[in-house]
Image (cartoon, rainbow, N blue to C red):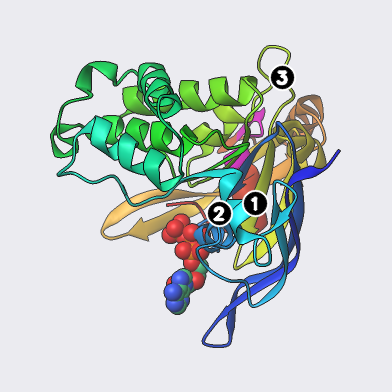
Amino acid sequence: MTAAVSLENVYKFYDKRPVVNDLSFTIETGEIFALLGPNGAGKSTTIRMLTTLTKPSEGRLEVGGYDVINQSMLAKKSIGVVLQQVSVDGDLTVWENMELHGRLHHIPNPQRKQKINQWLEYVELADRRNDLVKTLSGGMKRRLQIARALLHQPQILFLDEPTVGLDPQTRRRLWEIIRDLNKQGMTILLTTHYMDEVEYLCDAFGSAKPGRIGIMDSGKLISLGTLQELRSTYGEGLVMKQVGVNQVEGDTANSWEYLFFPTLAAANDYLEQQQNKTGMMVRPSNLEDIFVELTGRRLD
Ligand SMILES: Nc1ncnc2c1ncn2[C@@H]1O[C@H](COP(=O)(O)OP(=O)(O)OP(=O)(O)O)[C@@H](O)[C@H]1O
């Protein structure tokens, strides 16, 4: 099976500094893949290269089986893109924004009209079709961006931090949409800072395969696998040990040492053997623990 997305030894330099540093991975057709990492890790640059917005300095990138440099028109046709910045035009109506995108992609009438209706219904914006986009909430604008990205029937959807700045209910709504699209067979690559987003979207749901998680830091892919694979690799059981109290801007914060164990039972056994259990606790490990272990810092 052809990979939906593939990167081979990709580099991007800004002022001779590698912000993407020898990145290689593939995403299978129908897979959901989350690229996770702190600010400046190189996630957006990776998406920008895959969506033909920025050229790689070195390496090969393919989307939908097309080389993003030499077959950029075909590559562009196979992808839908939702970028961090809300890119819909506030002075046009919802319908006009969709119409403009449909015309840019040469979708003929009446198919265009039918598709616009279909996707506006899907993201529950049909009743707002005649409203100016600047009157929509942040979540609605994001849903419009998604509807617009889907209009030309792409096989792969790229979402760069799709839920940043949205309230919890709206984030959940978007997660449902993303999950449903993936269930329908859409390949999805998203970037995010949010652990709960990754855990929710990459969970095995229904009969679907769990999504994979790529952790990036300083331009490099430092870990790759399903949540279960990452937990098996780094340890499913965790002992948290209080090692001191930090002064943070006049406030105090506990400082913890994390000890990983292959299983929760092994973590419990370790705790049992300790003479002084003060300041120690055991729990199953989660994605954030693994991230902290790998990068030595927390996400924003
Ligand atoms: N056009 C540019 N010129 C110079 N440096 C850039 C440019 N675009 C990005 N960078 C730098 O590249 C690095 C990676 O940025 P990028 O936006 O890809 O990271 P990110 O993981 O998406 O971060 P965030 O989560 O904050 O969006 C950063 O250090 C950034 O300052």
Q: Is residue 80 left or right of residue 289?
A: left
Q: Residue at x 37, y 16 (%)?
A: 121
Q: Position of residue 209 (x, y in %)?
A: 74, 24
Query: Label 1, label 3: how many angstroms apart (C-alpha)?
Result: 22 Å
Any atom of ligand 1 within 8 Å of the CB at mark 2?
Answer: yes
Q: Is residue 124 left or right of residue 255?
A: left
Of marks 1 and 3, the one in the foreground: 3
Find the magenta span and give its range.
Answer: 281-288
* Secondary structure type for disc 1: strand
Of marks 2 and 3, the one in the foreground: 3
| Labels 2 & 1 near each other (Cβ < 8 A) | yes
Residue found at the very far bottom of the displayed protein? 16
Assess disc 1: are there few (<14), some (14-19) or many (≥20) residues with their C-alpha within 10 Å of its C-alpha: many
Q: Quadrant of residue 4?
A: top right
Q: Is residue 46 left or right of residue 266?
A: left
Query: Label 2, label 1: how many angstroms apart (C-alpha)?
Result: 6 Å
Q: Which mark is residue 263?
A: none
Which residue bears the numbered disc 3? 208
Which residue bears the numbered disc 1? 215
